[in-house]
């Protein structure tokens, strides 16, 4: 792992520092675009990967962020019930506009605007987690407590 060079990764590092977290962004030569790619590049288990999935409220258009274990899939009907409206998958333009980051590198903090955030309860079972840091090649290590602190998200079963 190398030190931060990309602008997106530098913004994530600044957001981590602003939150008072000691997490450090590192860039990898391999892609971390998918949970499987990230786990392989880091040398951890897929369930330790925090994937950021952005959805859109079907009625309100509000952005909804789900941070999920790399092993899990989001039950979209259940998520809609939790947020109080049907949800739709967000397209690449919506994700970039609302988060400031492209799909494959969306972090859990430092977004363009506040996001309604939901945390997969399965992530709290891991001692160590790894998350995207602004680019498809940047990651940072964190704990479940760090994740809760940085997102202030609600912990739920997403499956």
Image (spheres, grey):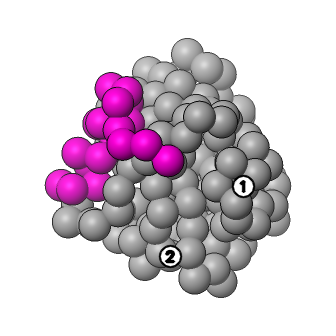
Q: Which residue is mark 2?
A: 144
x and y percent of residue 69 in the render? 70, 63
Q: Nearer the viewer, residue 158 or 19?
A: 19
Judged from the image, the secondary structure of the residue bearing numbered disc 2 is helix
Q: Which residue is mark 1?
A: 39
The label nearer to you, 2 versus 1, is: 1
Q: Residue at x 35, y 70 (%)?
A: 149
Is 73 magenta? The answer is no
x and y percent of residue 51 in the render? 64, 51
Query: Which residues are the magenta region?
Result: 1-18
Q: Earlier in the sequence, mark 2 or mark 1?
A: 1
Find residue 22 and report its image quarter: bottom left
Q: From the image, which quarter does the C terminus lie in? A: bottom right
> Is there any visible trace of residue 71 in the rendered image?
yes
x and y percent of residue 139 in the render? 50, 48
Find residue 20 and report its image quarter: bottom left
């Amino acid at each position: 792992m190398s030190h931060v060079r990309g602008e997106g990764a530098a913004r994530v590092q600044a957001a981590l520092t602003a939150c008072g977290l000691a997490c450090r962004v590192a860039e990898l030569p391999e892609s971390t675009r998918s949970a499987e790619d990230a786990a392989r590049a880091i040398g951890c288990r897929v369930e330790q990967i925090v994937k950021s999935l952005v959805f859109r409220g079907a009625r309100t258009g509000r952005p909804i962020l789900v941070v999920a274990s790399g092993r899990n899939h989001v039950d979209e009907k259940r998520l809609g019930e939790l947020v109080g409206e049907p949800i739709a998958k967000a397209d690449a333009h919506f994700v970039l506009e609302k988060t400031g980051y492209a799909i494959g590198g969306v972090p859990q903090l430092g977004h363009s605007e506040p996001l309604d955030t939901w945390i997969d309860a399965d992530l709290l079972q891991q001692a160590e987690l790894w998350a995207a840091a602004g680019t498809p090649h940047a990651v940072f290590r964190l704990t479940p407590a760090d994740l809760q602190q940085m997102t202030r998200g609600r912990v739920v079963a997403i499956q």
